[in-house]
């Protein structure tokens, strides 16, 4: 019996719920069907897998925003490559249309390339050397059940296409569906911006910091003239948090958030090191260990050892993110006339800026899923900013040291983040105790594989073997 993924530690079952109404665009409708298809995975794996396994719109708790509830997403167990967890947490999928880089590490330059690799790769249970089998599996499903859909949407006779062309066609349709996923922008924040005729984002040629300064000035002017409109749900605390979010003046109490989380999508689509990899590595191998890690500034990339999660018995292995795939020819981080070796150093442990809309619906946070609450995530940024100012954070992002917020700012920033939530999504209640608790130990390092259950383990020898291995971390990749 193949398993259905559940997560008892999170108290929910991850399901494949998509919108009830069919999209009128036949390409999007077809892509949505393929996105929820559960037969593309390897038959040799121990669990059914589809895109919605890690990217569900909803679960039993409610709206999920196509983000995974597990800290690190799961893939099928294969005896030849034992392991349950993928490298990272699967993020949400909204507002990706037009992005130049896909994945938190920027590995792919298009949604089509990312999707094709997923359909035929390890996340769907396929091992290196099984590409042809994977293509054949996908193609057989398309020819059997999706011929009419491809004919209508793309005027393609899928029965006459090669296996490789079938996979490419499936990836194209799924990518078209993902491009259709745009945030509703129906939050209290959006209403506040509209009612006060504020620009949703920077004007052409205007940098994020300048935009933040201008919006603050416009808000101040409206307050002085008593013309500032207040939208329902946009509280005094949310407005105070918005001010901190926009404030970028050096050496003042400010969030410096807007320089990376640029409205209206709240991401600059760029890559930054905010200290998450160093925190994880040093928590396992000791303070200062990441600073001593030997990272080559020349040679072949990606490197397998820098596409791993940090583990106690495997010093030297960690996740360096964009470093593995950055190319100066197309990188937004590259500086003109910069030596490639210097450029590589500046990409160490950088990851793509995540968006901020509907955050309470999409925990855990950051690329490694190490932070289960917004409070702990904010606390990490404060501590990383302090390390950056002290010169103790390797390759710290230049803007990180500009974060200067106090613990009593957390409540207002929290209120602002809640104000970015659309109707029908979850909000979060601020817990001051969670800020204190986050200083003790990041949640990810207390994670135990056996806290997560698989339905059907008792009937499946492969799953039973995994349960035995879970009690011995040395046997889990």
Image (tube, rainbow, N blue to C red):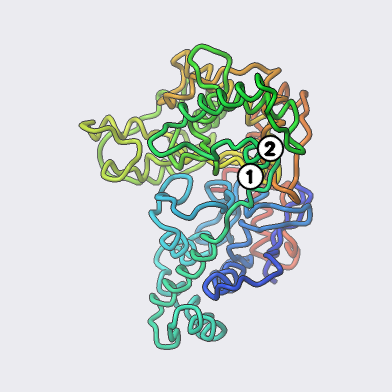
Label 2 secondary element:
loop
Residue at 74 percent across and 49 percent down: it is 423
Q: Which residue is mark 1?
A: 71
Is 355 located above or below residue 28 in the figure?
A: above
| Residue 204 picture quarter | top left
Q: What x and y, as percent, mark residue 310? A: 51, 37
* Mark 2 vs 1: CB contact within 8 A: yes
Between the residue at mark 2 and the residue at mark 1, the CA separation in whole angstroms equals 8 Å
* Residue nearest the observer in this picture, 165 or 149: 149
Q: As drawn, is 416 to the left or to the right of 155?
A: right
Q: What x and y, as percent, mark residue 105? A: 44, 45
Residue at 70 percent across and 25 percent down: it is 412
Is 156 located above or below residue 113 in the figure?
A: below
Whether residue 233 is visible to the viewer of this picture, yes or no, is: yes
Q: As drawn, is 89 to the left or to the right of 235?
A: left
Is 293 located above or below residue 115 in the figure?
A: above
Label 1 secondary element:
loop
Label ID, residue 417? none
Is 12 located above or below residue 381 in the figure?
A: below
Whether residue 43 is visible to the viewer of this picture, yes or no, is: no
Q: What x and y, as percent, mark residue 32? A: 59, 69
Label ID, residue 372? 2
Q: What x and y, as percent, mark residue 181? A: 57, 58
Q: Tell me if mark 2 has few (under 14), some (14-19) or many (20+) residues whose alpha carbon lies within 10 angstroms of its own.
A: many
* Residue nearest the observer in this picture, 403 or 225: 225
Q: Earlier in the sequence, mark 2 or mark 1?
A: 1
């Amino acid at each position: 019996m193949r398993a259905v993924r559940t997560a008892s530690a999170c108290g929910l079952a991850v399901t494949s719920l998509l919108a009830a109404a069919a999209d009128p665009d036949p390409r999007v409708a077809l892509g949505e069907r393929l996105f929820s298809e559960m037969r593309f995975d390897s038959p040799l794996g121990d669990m059914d897998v589809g895109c919605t396994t890690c990217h569900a719109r909803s679960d039993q708790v409610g709206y999920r925003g196509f983000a995974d509830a597990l800290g690190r997403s799961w893939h099928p167990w294969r005896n030849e490559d034992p392991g349950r967890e993928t490298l990272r947490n699967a993020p949400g999928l909204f507002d990706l249309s037009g992005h130049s880089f896909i994945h938190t590490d920027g590995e792919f330059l298009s949604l089509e390339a990312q999707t094709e690799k997923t359909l035929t790769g390890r996340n769907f249970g396929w091992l290196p050397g099984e590409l042809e089998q994977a293509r054949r599996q996908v193609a057989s499903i398309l020819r059997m059940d999706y011929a009419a859909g491809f004919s209508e949407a793309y005027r393609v006779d899928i029965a006459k296409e090669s296996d490789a062309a079938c996979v490419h066609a499936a990836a194209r349709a799924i990518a078209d569906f993902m491009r259709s996923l745009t945030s509703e922008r129906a939050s209290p924040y959006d209403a506040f911006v509209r009612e006060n005729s504020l620009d949703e984002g920077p004007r052409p040629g205007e940098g994020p910091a300048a935009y933040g300064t201008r919006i603050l000035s416009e808000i101040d002017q409206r307050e002085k003239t008593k013309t500032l409109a207040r939208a329902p749900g946009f509280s005094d605390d949310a407005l105070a948090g918005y001010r901190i979010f926009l404030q970028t003046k050096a050496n003042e109490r400010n969030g410096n958030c807007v320089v990376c989380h640029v409205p209206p999508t709240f991401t600059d689509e760029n890559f930054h090191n905010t200290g998450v990899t160093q925190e994880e590595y040093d928590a396992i191998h000791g303070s200062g260990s990441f600073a001593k890690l030997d990272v080559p500034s020349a040679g072949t990339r990606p490197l397998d050892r820098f596409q791993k999660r940090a583990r106690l018995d495997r010093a030297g292995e960690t996740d360096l993110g964009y470093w593995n795939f950055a190319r100066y020819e197309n990188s937004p981080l590259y500086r003109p006339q910069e030596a490639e070796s210097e450029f590589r150093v500046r990409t160490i442990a950088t990851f793509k800026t995540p968006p901020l809309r509907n955050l309470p619906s999409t925990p855990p946070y950051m690329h490694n899923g190490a932070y289960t609450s917004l409070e702990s995530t904010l606390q990490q940024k404060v501590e990383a900013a302090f390390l950056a100012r002290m010169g103790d954070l390797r390759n710290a992002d230049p803007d990180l040291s500009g974060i200067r917020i106090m613990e009593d700012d957390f409540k207002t920033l929290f209120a602002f983040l809640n104000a970015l939530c659309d109707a029908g999504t979850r909000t979060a209640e601020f817990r001051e105790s969670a800020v204190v608790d986050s200083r003790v130990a990041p949640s990810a390092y207390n994670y135990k594989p056996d806290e997560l259950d698989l339905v059907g383990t008792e009937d499946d020898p492969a799953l039973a073997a995994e349960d035995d291995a879970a009690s011995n971390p040395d046997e889990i990749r």
